[in-house]
Image (spheres, helix red, strand yellow):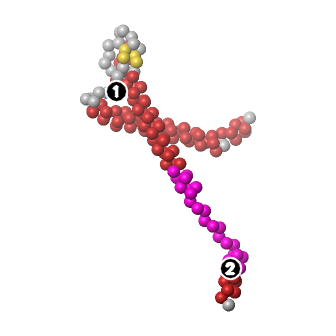
Amino acid sequence: MLKEFREFAMKGNVVDLAVAVIIGAAFGAIVTSLVGDVIMPVIGAITGGLDFSNYFIPLAKNVTATNLADAKKQGAVLAYGNFLTLTINFLIIAFVLFIVIRLMNQFKRKEEVKPAEPPKPTPEVELLTEIRDLLKKS
């Protein structure tokens, strides 16, 4: 059973999937940083210094905090600012993946359209061609 599992785990598809998951997680962290550290501050500056990550609606009556972290400690809150930030993350990731897949498809189409080079003639065919050409000259 262990041998069978090892064969399964070492198949190309499983290893490729593992690499894709790891790269996807790293890419997700990059996009999260891009949105949280670059895009949202710019949007906040444009909208007058608003911080979307601290937008919430208190669901418990005793929530009096003004930031999300403290509000969660006091009771249930509906953190729609976090949802907005994660939605922007998703849209950026989806857009980037769309562009990457589109470019890959264009590249594949260019490869398919590219005519194949004719095969090189064998040495025997080259020799026969030379003999034919010499006979034509004489």
The residue sitting at 47% across, 37% down in the picture is 94
Q: Amino acid at mark 2?
A: Thr
Alpha-carbon span between mark 2 and mark 1: 77 Å
Disc 2 packing (10 Å; few <14; some 14–19; many ≥20)? few
Above or below, comparing residue 39 to residue 76 in the picture: below
The residue sitting at 69% across, 72% down in the picture is 122
The rendered magenta stretch, by its main secondary structure, is classed as: helix
Q: Which quadrant would the N terminus be assigned to in this image?
A: top right
Find out whether residue 118 is within the magenta segment. yes
Q: Circle 2 sits in a helix, a strand or a loop, which is it?
A: helix
Q: Which quadrant would the C terminus be assigned to in this image?
A: bottom right
Above or below, comparing residue 127 to residue 4 in the picture: below
The label number, if any, that marks residue 52 in the structure image: 1
Image position, residue 44 (x, y; %): 30, 31
Q: Which residues are magenta?
A: 106-130
Pick the front one: 98 or 135: 135
In which quadrant of the rendered view does residue 135 lie? bottom right
The residue pinned by badge 2 equals 129
Q: Is residue 29 visible?
A: no
The residue sitting at 32% across, 16% down in the picture is 65
Q: Is residue 138 left or right of residue 89?
A: right
